Image: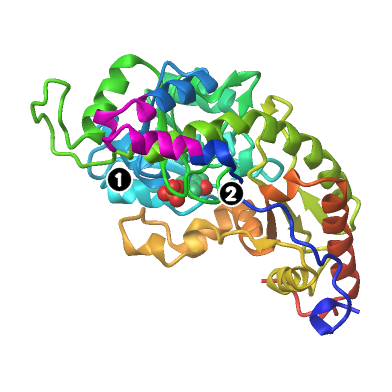
Amino acid sequence: MLAMNGGPKVRTTPFPHWPQFDDLDRAAVGRALDQGSWWRFGGKEVSSFEQEFAEFHHAPAALAVTNGSHALELALEIIGLRPGDEVIVPAYTFIATATAVQRRGGIPVLVDVDPVTYCMDPEELEAATTERTRAVIPVHIGGHVADMDAINAWAEPRGITVIQDAAQAHGAMWRDQGLGALGSMATFSFQETKVVTAGEGGALLLPNEESYEIAHMRHNCGRARDLSLRTASSNFRISEMTGALLRVQLGRLAAQTERRERQYERLAAGLAGIPGVVPQGRDERCTVNPHYMTMFILDPEELDGLDRDTVSGALFAEGIPAFGCNRAIHRTEAFWTARTGPEPAEDLARRCPNAEKLGSRGLMIPHQVLLGGDQEIDDVVEGLTKVLAELPRTGSGHA
Ligand SMILES: *Cc1c(COP(=O)(O)O)cnc(C)c1O
């Protein structure tokens, strides 16, 4: 019997906790405190973190900022986005990818995602291009790197700037290159759920030292190194305590990613063996995937009548954390509260069927499940198998 109806739960013990920390983190924060000055100008934790983060991603430079949303906004400032400029973003992503464009005065133009990788489909770019297209923001969703070969090859001859939204892809690699070696800026988030976290925080990878200097000025109230106030900007700086914590957390990323890669194989194989469950696929050129989320779709053909949110609720009752994927961007109220293109939601929905499907039929499992052992993986597979077998089918169709 299903746990939601009073039956026994598949799993009664908790999955690994996130965030993870020990005496190393305590010592790092203490070290930052003991510097006696807590902003980046009085110590060396933030600047050391920037160097280590840049190196880890094969980037010439990195700048630490307040959060991933601000990192995106700052990237758009750095390229000099003007009011009315268009920026192409995937229709399936976290809302900040689109709202950052809107908050900088631009117009986000949505394109559909690839049905296998769930990342921006490069085939859709040309049809979305106008003479106002200024930039494109591929999102490495769930940790899977978007097709950077095709996106770069399309953008470069057209003079369109690429900004990678890597908020879910710390340490990811494309053809064995870090995201900082791909010739474009990349933005990151360190909020609580991400694979590197200090509770809050963010960063940008920068393709050269000049762009680092511009970014530094803009994250520091528009103040140049000589302290002259050069441009109307804002304060996106982080504290030394955050910097110190991020250095320790970054130090764990490689080993944690290796473990998640290994456990993901077991989980994806288990999920793929359940009728009607289709896990996110992998492009072989994505040589390292940190697996921020394990994403899968409940096939509407095979599982007709099973509502996604009912499945998620039943899984939670079994002790398995599985969240419904975000709605597609054009399905949110937020998107329509700021400037958009002329296309109404219904047209966007028709043009972006894969984003629609993820938004209504997609589920995701957080990365800490992959930090457990084989039993954790097997419990997830058993839980989903049980729930899909026992939940009544209404036959009333899907959303
Ligand atoms: C988390 C996330 C962001 C925003 O990061 P915050 O630090 O929460 O502002 C942006 N884009 C994507 C794809 C994200 O997952």
Q: Marks 2 and 1: in contact by CB < 8 Å?
A: no
Image-quadrant location for residue 382: bottom right
Where does residue 293 sit, x and y in percent of width and height? 66, 48
Where does residue 32 sit, x and y in percent of width and height? 38, 35
187 displayed left or right of 81? right
376 displayed left or right of 37? right
Boundaries of the magenta span: 27-47
Instruction: Give the CA distance from mark 1 to mark 2.
Output: 35 Å
Q: Secondary structure at mark 2?
A: loop
Indicate whether 132 appears above or below 339. Answer: above
Where does residue 380 sit, x and y in percent of width and height? 82, 57
Q: Nearer the viewer, residue 54 or 305?
A: 54
Would the CB of label 2 be found within 8 Å of ligand 1? no
Q: Residue furthest left?
A: 228
Task: Kindly identify the amino acid type of the residue bearing the numbered disc 2.
Answer: Pro
Quadrant containing the N terminus is bottom right
Indicate whether 124 appears above or below 206. Answer: below
Report crowding for label 1: few under 14, some 14 to 19, many 20 or more residues within 10 A (C-alpha): many
Q: Nearer the viewer, residue 127 or 292?
A: 292
Residue 106: numbered disc: 1
Question: Taking the image as drawn, is residue 120 in sight?
Answer: no
- Dominant SS of magenta comes to helix
Mark 2 sits on what residue?
Answer: 19
